[in-house]
Image: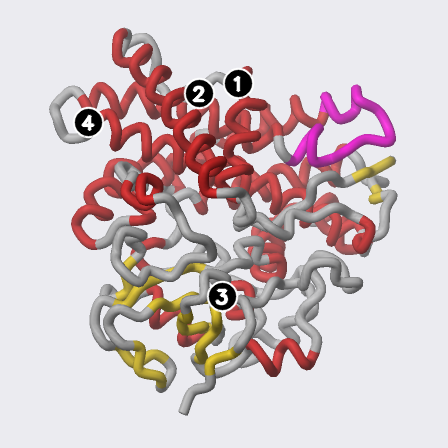
Amino acid sequence: MTQTMETELPCWPPVNSARGPFTPLDDAERQRYVGPVTRVLLPTGATAWLVSRHTDVRQLLRHPAFSSDLQRPGFPLLRPLPPEVAMNNQGAFIRMDGAAHSRLRRMLTAEFMIKNVRRIEPLIHRTVDEALADLATAGSPADLVSTFALPLPSKVICHLLGVPYADHDFFQSRSRLLLNREVPPEQFQHAAQELRDYLGALIDTKQAHPDEADDLLSRLIRERVAPGELGIDELVGMTLLLLIAGHETTANMIGLSVLLLTRHPEQYAILRERPELAAGMVDELLRYLSIVRTGLFRLATEDVEIGGQLIRAGEGAIVLISLANRDTEVFDDPDEFDPYRQAHQHLAFGFGMHQCIGQPLARAELRIALVELARRFPDLRVTADPQELSTRDSSIVFGLDTLPVTW
């Protein structure tokens, strides 16, 4: 008989942990959370199945019987959401299943294919160069998050979408509210509506002059909205998803990666001395840091056995990719960061039909940003202990608030 654990989902690392922002679970926590599929108690009082093993996570995420739709009764949640939030999924294809999900995702697939990302690498290089110049101008000491890690992906996604970067303070502040699991529902709803209104007005302006730009929004207006294949509300939802995911995740990865690498100067030097290894190192960083630490949430629509445990229709499941990326059955010494590891089996971008569509862009941004930072600032060092840094423990996407550096 499976025992229900009288605890919330694991926060990895635990809030206020003395072990710092990327140290693995201790032995007691590992025994409690890692292993066979088991039940956990959610903050809402509901229960769900916790899935942490690499094989089980892959099996669940590729199985069509597990839904991402928040509107389904019984969907597992970390907090209650107002009905208008749960119902407003238009365009948010990561919250859709089957044909509805595929229809919208296909409209974006070509934009984020590896060959297209390679074509925009000159743009990424220019943006990195500009951000590094701003960092140098700011002078030492500086905050790497606000001067480099956050502006870089924000400028790139704004350029691709056609969103004015001048409005970054507005959309970044609202984005963080949407990602914060401790924000009251009313504040969450208000931030979401503000962003939808902002993007709706921007799309209206572009729709009035559809041939004046070649950004992604303008192309979707010409090629999808005009023929009637895509509604305006759907386009707003798609854009909101891309805007948030396109800057928050990569920004947090850059900050945490620099903190980790500069603790070991010989690893940081690899980026400068052997940049051809950077792509592999990025995979290891993605595996080791695993910034989506609250998990991916699903609802079973039919009875399915995962890892020997029957999950019945109507029951919730949560996969912890952060723990799957430390599975000893897949990765040797997984609690050690190894810059030479072949970590391509990591699940940092998810798996299956909902695997992150923007991963080629994120990989390119991380690789270029880290290599150029190491080349331009070879003596960069962090001026605070990891345990002293302010981290976003309440965010769905884990990261650092600031990263004080000098050189």
Q: Earlier in the sequence, mark 4 or mark 2?
A: 2
Secondary structure state at the residue bearing disc 4:
helix
Compared across the picture, whether 51 is left or right of 209 comes to right
Secondary structure mostly seen in the magenta stretch: helix
Where is 234 relative to 395, above or below?
above
Q: Quick one: label 1, few (<14), some, or many (20+) residues within 10 Å?
A: few
CA distance for labels 4 and 2: 18 Å
Q: Amino acid at mark 4?
A: Arg
Q: Of tags 4 and 3, which is closer to the observer?
A: 3
Say if mark 2 contacts mark 3, CB within 8 Å.
Answer: no
Q: In terms of secondary structure, where does tag 1 sit?
A: helix
Residue 298 falls in image quadrant: bottom left
Please report whichever mark, 2 or 3, sits nearer to the chain's N-terminal start.
2
Where does label 4 land, which residue?
Answer: 224
Specify few, some or many for label 3: CA neighbours under 10 Å numbering under 14, 14-19, or 20 or more.
many
Q: Write down the residue under mark 1.
A: 167
What's the CA distance linking mark 2 and mark 3?
33 Å
Q: What amino acid is labelled 2 in the image?
A: Val
Q: Residue beneath label 3, please?
A: 320
Q: Is residue 4 magenta?
A: no
Residue range of the region highlighted in magenta in the rendering? 133-149
Q: Quadrant of the C terminus?
A: top right
Picture quadrant of residue 7? bottom right
Tell me the number on the disc at residue 51.
none
Report which residue position mark 2 lands on: 163
Within 10 Å of disc 4 (Cα), the crowding (few <14, some 14-19, many 20+) is some
- Between circles 2 and 1, the one closer to the viewer is 1
SS class, disc 3: loop
